[in-house]
Image (cartoon, grey):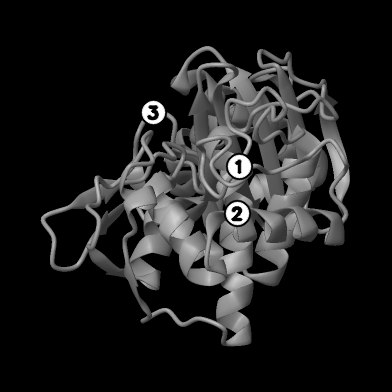
Amino acid sequence: MKKRWLIILCIGLVIFVGTVLFSNTERLGFKPAINAQAVVLMEIDTGRILVNHNGEMPLPPASMSNLMTELIILEDLKAGRISWDDEVAISEEASTIGGVQLSLKEGDVLTVRELFQSVAVYSANDAAMALAEHASGSEKAFVQRMNAKAKEIGLSSHTRFSSASAIDGRGSGKAGSGQDEGTRMTARDTALLAAHLIDHHPDVLTASSQTQLKIVGRDLYLSNTNWMLPSLRGPYSYEGTDGLKTGYNEQLGYCFTGTAERHGTRLIAVVMGTPTKEARFEETRKLFEYGFSKTLSWKERLGDWMTHPVAAEAVTHESFSRL
């Protein structure tokens, strides 16, 4: 028996060494190969940039621009200018916005909470537009606030918002004029915005980590577009992930701003421009693996390994005490 458990322990140690050191190049400390137009990996507590590939290039972020919409709405809620239970009547503009939406009709009434959760979970454009109109009277006025807030929190001049949703030009009044290129964000600015949002409004992670949302009084269920959530138990799930925002447009492709926390260390990964929706999560996983390999101590990684079935059996079996 003693010999048997010694063998199990040795096998477990081999698994640990292989997992920590040799499973992929990220574990060895090498930066991962980048298969996206732009990426940035940030350690949120220190603001340290661990990976930067074209991070200062302005690109169309699609629904990732909703991170700024969420920030302003949460600030208005905190200041008491609006409340979660406010009822919002959907305008004609919001009902005809297009893109990813809830298919709301003009005159439909939803609460601020329902609209906000629809943006956080599903990136619904009509919900984002309705929130903007409720908070500022018009989307144009809300977009002015978005750009002012970007400057206030230190985003670069390369980042500019033209709408409260993923549909460009709606809030600028210049759509189709040739003078407005639409919303542009850099990967670095997106990471900074996400860090500011989480730091000042950590409850946003409660909304962004919901796997499914039901709109009260409607036969409408929304599934989270973030396939990395552990609760989904899918092939792209990654332990510690609890946000934050996906995006897609024809110009750039697929995007994702992801965040994960392990042993008190939180990372933010921004991936912009992958050819498939799956690839954005695969790239984010590589970034997280690299980031945590650089920021977590060997003791913390050993703690993760101790949950492995072989290791757990070896160290908890009563025979181990007699080795």
* Residues under numbered marks 1 and 2 in contact, where contact means CB atoms less than 8 Å apart: yes
3D distance between C-alphas at marks 3 and 2: 41 Å
Q: At numbered mark 2, what does the secondary structure look like: helix, strand or loop?
A: helix
Q: Residue at x 78, y 49 (%)?
A: 192
The dot on residue 173 is: 1
* Left or right, 323 with reference to 50: left
Front residue of 205 and 185: 185
The dot on residue 140 is: 2
- Compared with residue 109, is residue 39 higher up or lower down, i.e. above or below? above
Front residue of 303 and 209: 209
Give the residue type that dot 2 points to: Lys
**Between discs 1 and 2, the one toward the N terminus:** 2
Q: Is residue 38 visible?
A: yes
For label 3, the residue is 235
The picture places residue 184, in percent across and down from the top left corner, at 71, 33
Which is closer to the viewer, label 3 or label 2?
2
* Left or right, 218 with reference to 233: left
**Between discs 3 and 2, the one toward the N terminus:** 2
Q: Residue at x 34, y 43 (%)?
A: 232
